[in-house]
Amino acid sequence: MLVEARAEVHRPSSRTWGEVLSRIPHDIYHTAQYHLVPGLGTAGEPYAFSYEEERCAFLWPYFLVPIPQAPGYFDVTSAYGYPGPVGTPDPAFIERAWRALLYHWKQQHAVSAFTRFHPLLGNARLLDGVSSEDGKPAWEGLRELGLTVSIDLTQSLEQQVRGYNKKMRQSIRKLFEAGYECGEDHEFAHLDDFIRVYTATMSRRMSRAEFVVDADWVREFRCLLGENARLFVTKYQGAVVAAMLVMEYAPYVHCHLIGTDERFAAESPSKALLDYVRRWGTERGLRSMHLGGGVGGRQDSLFEYKSRFSEVTHGFQIGGWVLDEPVYRELETAHRARLEAMGVEADREFFPAYRSVPG
């Protein structure tokens, strides 16, 4: 039986991008507006590929990034955060969508494709049992990177707090008793304070330059996301000592970027801020507050800190697929030779291999 299908590619200005999303469960990371947010390690031009049949829909947002050493060729990559595909969970339908997507990417002269998946949606499962036309399973490109942490906001406020580590509960109580105050900055009046504490935090963590933002970036972020973008602050004696950019997109609230004044790092006023946003999200009827994971998905000190708020964890997966084998291997070989000439060993975990950076 012939299946009537429609495969399309969209730019952020296309109304159809949002129309397809409206048919399937998704999050802010899949929207056109989010894909217009600059920086945070993201480059290239934003697109979304959609595949639709009568009662089914599929959409995969991505960036197409030129390969400098191979003019005319590109890599498919992922927005910062947790995007990946969304679609109707029908295996036969998803397989047809996957094959149409691979064909489309090859038409765009893409050499490789990379994405981060969404831990709460569990959208990596969409690729279970799916294969390309040559029989290659899609799951072969998947890799478990680590865990992320969330707080279940469907529980009562008391149950949520009982899920905290005991020392975390005591520390937060002491912060509020000492006079720390939290609230939403509806007008982004403390934008400069956010930049100050966030920049200081990124410096302490020795984060890469592309993950540091400025005031113009925050203004554009707010303009693009509208009411989905929120700013919360913690104050002590009238001064901002912690601040966090939050994304609210029902049923989720995401702790996007957070910073602490280095003079108060020992007190960690961000604890009080996270606790406040938890209560705020619960009162708004949201289902989950996503704290994220460690740096690069690792179960490091940052992950350990977040896990003191909740025992609820989610597997965080990434995916990488070679689309043009001959070109990929040629680029990989040349890149490895360049690194060897510099006396540097190639990072065999990095994908695509020819974009790994020494150090």
Image (cartoon, rainbow, N blue to C red):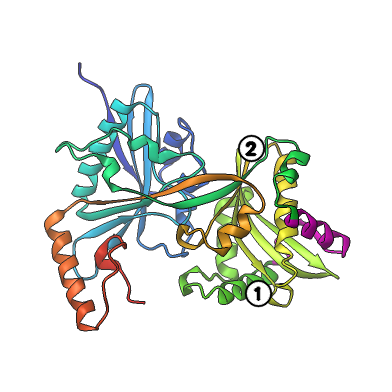
Label 2, residues with CA under 10 Å away: few <14, some 14-19, many ≥20: some
Q: Is residue 187 visible?
A: no
In front: mark 1 or mark 2?
A: 2
Q: Position of residue 209 (x, y in %)?
A: 47, 74
Q: Position of residue 247 (x, y in %)?
A: 60, 51
Q: Could you give the CA–CA distance between mark 1 and mark 2, rounded to whole angstroms?
A: 31 Å
Query: Residue drawn 28% across and 26% down?
Result: 92
Task: Quickly name the residue at label 2.
Answer: 287
Under mark 1, the amino acid is Arg
Q: Is residue 188 magenta?
A: yes
Kindly give the residue lying farthest to the left in the view shown: 326
Task: Quickly name the residue at label 1.
Answer: 196
Query: Residue drawn 16% across and 53% down?
Result: 324
Q: Which residues are magenta?
A: 167-190
Taking the image as shown, residue 148 lies to the left or right of residue 110, namely right
Instruction: Please name whichever residue, 101 or 221, is drawn nearer the observer in this view of the structure.
Output: 101
Instruction: Please name whichever residue, 104 or 307, is drawn nearer the observer in this view of the structure.
Output: 307
Q: Quadrant of residue 130?
A: top left
